[in-house]
Image (cartoon, rainbow, N blue to C red):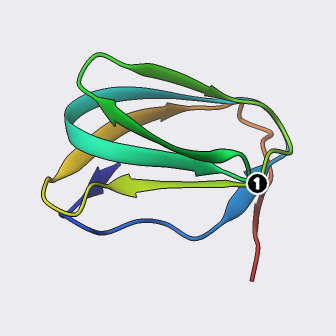
Amino acid sequence: VNFEAGARNKLHTHSRDQILFVVSGRGIVATEDGEREVTVGDTILIPEGERHWHGAAHDSDFAHISLTTPDTQNQIID
């Protein structure tokens, strides 16, 4: 998944754990507990059901590989 500087996805959940592998740039992974800056080489575990979003830092493009199971359901939170 590729993000231009400052771009992010919407607040959402997954029905299964999600693992993110950061492959380029700097990004942010945010949950209800706060925001964490991530960079190349970081691996992030997002537990099933956790409300979160992720995207690029305001001054850097960002890319990650997202790993979930094939039966994972995603829910966007408005």
Badge 1 amino acid: Arg
Q: Quadrant of residue 56?
A: bottom left
Q: In this view, does 77 lie to the left or right of 56?
A: right
Residue 2 horizontal side relative to residue 49, left or right: left
Is 13 left, or right, of 68 in this rendering?
right
Q: Residue at x 71, y 46 (%)?
A: 33
Residue under numbered circle 1: 51
Q: Position of residue 74 (x, y in %)?
A: 75, 57
Viewer-proximal residue among 25 and 66: 25
Q: To which quarter of the image does residue 46 belong? A: top right
Image location of residue 53, percent across then percent down: 57, 57
Q: Residue reaching furthest bottom? A: 78
Which residue occupies the foreground of this view, 72 or 60? 60
Task: Work out whether 55 lies above or below 25.
Answer: below
Characterize the local packing of mark 1: few (<14), some (14-19) or many (20 or more) Cα atoms within 10 angstroms.
Answer: some
Image location of residue 37, percent across then percent down: 37, 39
